[in-house]
Image (cartoon, helix red, strand yellow):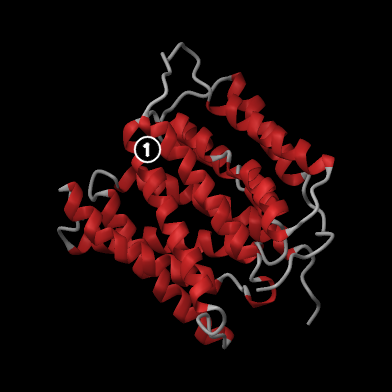
């Protein structure tokens, strides 16, 4: 069977597309359940997805470096806590812009932790993608922006996520995408209960309908994240991150087509910059990091 060309690139593209559908679903279902209910379902559906995939692929996602994978899973879940909290404290577009600093954060972390070479073109791609994010989500009117705790949490969420994907890259030949998603899902399910209790919001899972819709949405989010982790076997984290900015463009299109949100010329310009940066990284990787 011939090897599929550039599979890492297409996995990295498919992931933000799936996340865009997931984001739209979250907006629809948010009236039915809390963030913690969705986090719980995403965790358990992720576990089910991994075990089904491992059965068909005949892989054992817990066989290599379980302690290292626990660290990756915990960091991923912690990032979700930070970013979700930021979404409740500050305007969503501000939190998303700050979160998408993680590709540029992963450049430095990749160089320090994985000793991956960073070219001038790589830096330019990161800058172009981030500028596209800024242009796409920048408000049209004065917002009176001031530094708040939510901005710090969004920054920490991006930084912790960047660290988790850089560490995932070190798994290299052992990483099929199943290993990190399994441990992320386990930690997501574990932290959902105490957060739901401490916040007083609960899960909002009051019936079979909410459970079924939330499970399907959680499965979609887990599949999107699985593809992103699998892409890290072929591409360095900052390239996966820059391609991941397509998620913002996809979410903006959903806002325009299905939710009646208005998008102007600046949104189109920002979207074109994101597409240029993402598809400009359609190249093979030069040198792999050290293996763990």
Residue at the spot x=41%, y=13% of the render?
A: 144
* Left or right of residue 232: residue 193: left
Nearest to the observer: residue 140 or residue 258: 140
* Residue closer to the observer: 256 or 57: 57
Residue 29 or 143: which is nearer the viewer? 143
Q: Residue furthest top?
A: 142
Would you say residue 230 is visible in this rendering?
yes
Residue indicated by mark 1: 87
Q: Residue furthest front?
A: 112
Q: Quadrant of residue 115?
A: bottom right
Residue 149 relative to residue 227: left or right: left
- Within 10 Å of disc 1 (Cα), the crowding (few <14, some 14-19, many 20+) is some
Question: x, y percentage for residue 11?
Answer: 65, 61
Secondary structure at numbered mark 1:
helix
144 or 220, which is in the foreground?
Answer: 144
Q: Position of residue 88 (x, y in %)?
A: 32, 36
Q: Residue at x 79, y 66 (%)?
A: 5
Coordinates of residue 14 in the picture (x, y in percent)? 61, 56
Q: Residue at x 56, y 54 (%)?
A: 163
Left or right: where does residue 242 sit relative to residue 146? right
Q: Is residue 91 left or right of residue 124?
A: left
């Amino acid at each position: 069977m011939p090897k599929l060309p550039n599979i890492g690139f297409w996995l990295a593209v498919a992931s933000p597309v799936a996340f865009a559908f997931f984001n739209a679903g979250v907006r629809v279902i948010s009236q039915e359940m809390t963030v913690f209910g969705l986090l719980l379902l995403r965790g358990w559906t992720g576990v089910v997805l991994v075990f089904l995939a491992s059965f068909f692929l005949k892989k054992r996602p817990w066989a290599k470096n379980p302690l290292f994978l626990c660290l990756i899973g915990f960091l991923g879940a912690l990032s979700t806590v930070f970013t979700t909290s930021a979404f409740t404290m500050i305007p969503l577009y501000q939190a998303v812009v700050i979160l998408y600093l993680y590709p540029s954060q992963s450049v430095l972390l990749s160089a320090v932790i994985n000793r991956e070479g960073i070219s001038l073109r790589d830096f330019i791609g990161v800058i172009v993608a981030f500028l596209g994010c800024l242009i796409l989500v920048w408000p049209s009117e004065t917002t009176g922006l001031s530094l708040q705790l939510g901005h710090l949490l969004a920054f920490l969420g991006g930084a912790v996520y960047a660290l988790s994907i850089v560490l995932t890259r070190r798994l290299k030949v052992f990483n099929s995408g199943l290993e990190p998603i399994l441990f992320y899902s386990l930690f997501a399910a574990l932290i959902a209960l105490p957060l739901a209790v401490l916040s007083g919001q609960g899960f909002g899972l009051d019936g079979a309908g909410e459970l079924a819709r939330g499970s399907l949405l959680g499965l979609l989010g887990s599949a999107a994240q699985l593809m992103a982790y699998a892409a890290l076997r072929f591409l360095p984290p900052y390239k996966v991150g820059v391609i991941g900015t397509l998620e913002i463009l996809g979410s903006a299109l959903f806002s325009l087509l299905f939710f009646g949100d208005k998008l102007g010329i600046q949104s189109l310009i920002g979207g074109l910059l994101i597409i240029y940066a993402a598809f400009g990284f359609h190249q093979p990787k030069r040198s792999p990091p050290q293996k763990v």
